[in-house]
Image: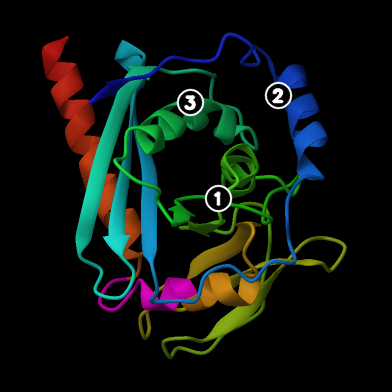
Amino acid sequence: MTIIETPSDWPADEAAARRIQDELRDRVVRDEPGPAPGTGLVTGVDVAYDDDRDLVAAAAVVLDAGTLDVVAEATAVGRVAFPYVPGLLAFRELPAVLAALAALPAGPGLVVCDGYGRAHPRRFGLASHLGVLTGLPVLGVAKNPFTFTHGPLGEHRGAAAPLLAGDGEEVGRALRTREGVKPVYVSAGHRVTLDNACAHTLRLTPRYRLPETTRRADALCRAALREATAAR
């Protein structure tokens, strides 16, 4: 388990965080398709908190994209880097996520975040921010649509509907991964297209609503947090 070191220049308030989002947003690469689904490695990242103890734990779990078997995993634990502010969640999670990724024995391949990329009020969610900082292809798969809306979609697996901003821009998609089950909300982060992000999401959900990357990273970061809390 790695101990998180928050960068010395990490923003301390909302205004500074928003300035950084504005500065980095134009660096997002949106015209690369990303790796083909089912090839190479795919890594899930997730974060768990104990706000009472000011603790955060992050996990990175690497899967073989073809078999979905676990190849490697790493965790990082430390203090929370930023207060909870809607739209600025990346500043709360990124130091932990970066530390977990850095602790992996090899490159993570495609990264899947439990959160947003383009489907963010400032078009720069966690998946985009992580991609710009690392240069990795990253996509976001969220459990809810945040501030965006979508029309009806079919009940069958693979049914999708555009996730629309107020100006009509398609910032992501509602995607049904299980028949008759609530959809997930997919958005491109960095160096991957929305079409490919949806294809990866379906490949990563053979049995459950959420991607195997997210399910495994969620379990691992919660276990790391329990261990850190017990140690305190």
Amino acid type for the residue under numbered disc 1: Leu
Instruction: Evaluate whether residue 172 shows in this view.
Output: yes
Q: Nearer the viewer, residue 170 or 85?
A: 170
Instruction: Evaluate whether residue 175 shows in this view.
Output: no
N-terminal-most mark, 2 or 3 = 2
Residue 186 vertical placement versus 105 (above, below): below
Q: Is residue 158 magenta?
A: no
Amino acid type for the residue under numbered disc 3: Pro
The percent position of residue 228, horizontal first and vertical second, equals 19, 20
Give the quadrant of residue 187: bottom right
Residue 14 vertical placement versus 115 (above, below): above
Q: Is residue 206 magenta?
A: yes
Number of marks present in the image shown = 3
Per the image, the residue denoted by label 2 is 17
Residue 111 vertical placement versus 20 (above, below): below
Q: Nearer the viewer, residue 157 or 4?
A: 4
Q: In the image, which is nearer the foreground, mark 2 or mark 1?
A: 1
Per the image, the residue denoted by label 1 is 136
The residue sitting at 20% across, 65% down in the picture is: 69
Q: Residues within 10 Å of mark 1 (few under 14, many from 20)?
A: many
N-terminal-most mark, 2 or 1 = 2
The percent position of residue 163, horizontal first and vertical second, equals 67, 68
Per the image, the residue denoted by label 3 is 95
